Amino acid sequence: MRLVTFNRSNGDSRLGLIDGEEVIDLQAAAGATGHGQGQFTDMKDFILAGDEGLKAAVGLLATAPADARHAVAEVTLLAPLKPSTILCSGSNYHAHNAEKANTPISGNEPEFFLKTSDCVIGPEDPIICDERVTKKLDCETELAVVIGKGGRFIPVEEALDHVFGYTVANDVTARDRQVRISPEGVTWYELGRGKAFDTSAPLGPVIVTADEIPDPQALQLSTRINGELRQSASTGDMIWSCADLVHFFSYNFTLKPGMVILTGTPAGTAWSADRDLGGHWTPAPGLVAATRYCLPGDKVESEIDAIGVLRNPVVSL
């Protein structure tokens, strides 16, 4: 099941289910067919409805009237979810660790930082490049895990049972705020200022339910900037799997429906070409090494197989 949040022509935000080239307005379809509408108010309510909500949405595929259906090309897709908490794991791909300067814990335990709903933007929304925030704006395509069933101290072997679905994320980063290197050559990361700021968490375009992605470690991920292929890798290169990360974060937090976990990015970031910050990477055949960080006018495409392409332009403030 492919779920979206979209705007109709009157500007209302609606929960939608993709059906081919159409999106079904689930609340409108439920009202027209005499079903309860409360579980279709927004993505968070739908996730909270659990299996009951999923079954009801499947039923509406066949019964939704014509006036509850809209061409996907004629609606505006928004961020599918505005999670209050985005739990993030850095340095979680073997190849990414090999391309950059690392801290003593890199690759030895998940690197833990947070983003909030204030960082979130949706498909086609602009990423703001503001030199007062950073002169080294970088982009990282990542698989995002959407929590469905809450829990604390979740065992690894049960972790994927707590996943509602998956979407695409771009972990936009201020590298010159993130990476610190001492005169003695010790590297450390300032992950607060380097990771959490306005427009630093594009999400979308859809959430694909977990039943359609039986193995989240077998997805191909890529990043294109102005059409150049910068990143291309399998989620199988993660150091800690999606299940590992659900388990890990559940020790700090009671995971709640609608929380999102970002799972890290592979090699090919602009950081990899920044010798001043310890970048050292030779691209594999077919990949184009960055020659600079992102600037206004750039177009970023973050893609994950089975989910879709998240597109965002970079603009000046």
Image (spheres, rainbow, N blue to C red):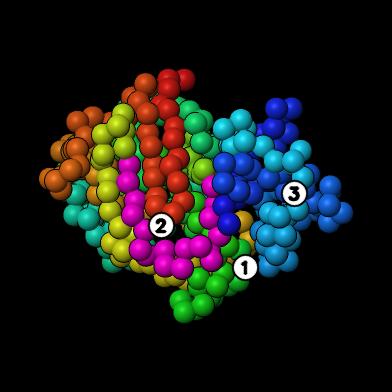
| Residue 223: quarter of image | top left
The residue under label 2 is which amino acid type? Thr
Side of 2 relative to 315 (left or right): right
Q: What is the span of residues highlighted in magenta in the rendered image?
A: 206-223
Please give the name of the residue rendered at 35% of the width and 63% of the height, measured from the top-left corner: 218
Q: Which residue is mark 2?
A: 263
Please give the name of the residue rendered at 74% of the width and 27% of the height, measured from the top-left corner: 10
Cβ atoms under marks 2 and 1 closer than 8 Å: no
Query: What is the x, y in percent for residue 38?
Result: 80, 53
Q: Which residue is mark 1?
A: 149
* In the image, residue 216 lies in the stretch drawn in magenta: yes
Single out the mark in the foreground, 3 or 1: 3
Secondary element at image label 3: loop
Q: Is residue 70 above or below residue 219?
A: above
Secondary element at image label 2: loop
Taking the view exactly as shown, the residue that stands out farthest to the right is: 34
| Residue 139: quarter of image | top left
Q: Is residue 136 above or below residue 44?
A: above
* In the image, residue 212 lies in the stretch drawn in magenta: yes
Q: How far apart are labels 2 and 1 at the CA level?
A: 18 Å
Q: How far apart are labels 3 and 1 at the CA level?
A: 28 Å
Q: Which residue is mark 3?
A: 64
